[in-house]
Image (cartoon, grey):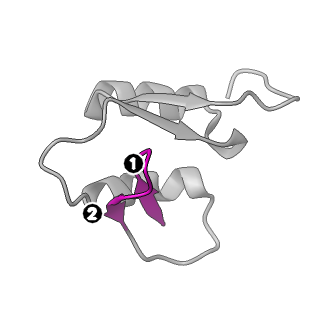
Amino acid sequence: MLIAEGCGLPIAANVDSASPAECQLLEAALAGSFLVELPERMIGDKAYDSDALDTKLRGEYNIEMIALNRCNRGRT
């Protein structure tokens, strides 16, 4: 997993098995950050639409996750 800033410059990376969902690998990727400070906001696809992930990122890392809502979204 690679996290890049808006212009495509990599800011964090992690290598892991492809079987877990991407949102479960996000914390390990953030731990592999090349920067001293993490970004304030991250943009992800529908796989990152999770209330639990939003709460965890905001509480532990002070990051706002911006993700499209899934069509069958409930409380996740």
Q: Tell me which residue sits at (50%, 35%) in the image.
A: 53
Q: Dot 2: few (<14), some (14–19), or many (≥20) neighbours within 10 Å?
A: some
Q: Which of the 4 image quadrants contains residue 3?
A: bottom left
Q: Which of the 4 image quadrants contains residue 50?
A: top right
Nearer the observer, 27 or 12 = 12
Number of numbered discs present? 2
Q: Amino acid at mark 1?
A: Glu
Q: Is residue 41 left or right of residue 62?
A: right
Residue 42 inside the magenta-drawn segment: no
Q: Residue furthest front?
A: 7
Residue identified by numbered label 1: 5
Between disc 1 and disc 2, the foreground one is 1
- Whichever of callouts 1 and 2 sits on the residue coming sooner in the sequence is 1
Nearer the observer, 20 or 9 = 9
In this view, 1 is above or below 66: below
Element carrying mark 1: loop
In this view, 72 is above or below 23: above
Q: Residue furthest left?
A: 36
Q: Is residue 41 left or right of residue 22?
A: left
Residue identified by numbered label 2: 32
Q: Dot 1: few (<14), some (14–19), or many (≥20) neighbours within 10 Å?
A: few
Q: Amino acid at mark 2?
A: Gly
**Span shown in magenta:** 1-13
Residue 11 inside the magenta-drawn segment: yes
Work out how far the residue at label 1 is from the one at label 2, CA to CA, in angstroms.
14 Å
Expressed as whole percent of the image width and height from the top left, the position of residue 17 reads: 54, 78
Element carrying mark 2: loop
Q: Tell me which residue sits at (55%, 50%) in the image.
A: 23
Q: Tell me which residue sits at (43%, 50%) in the image.
A: 7
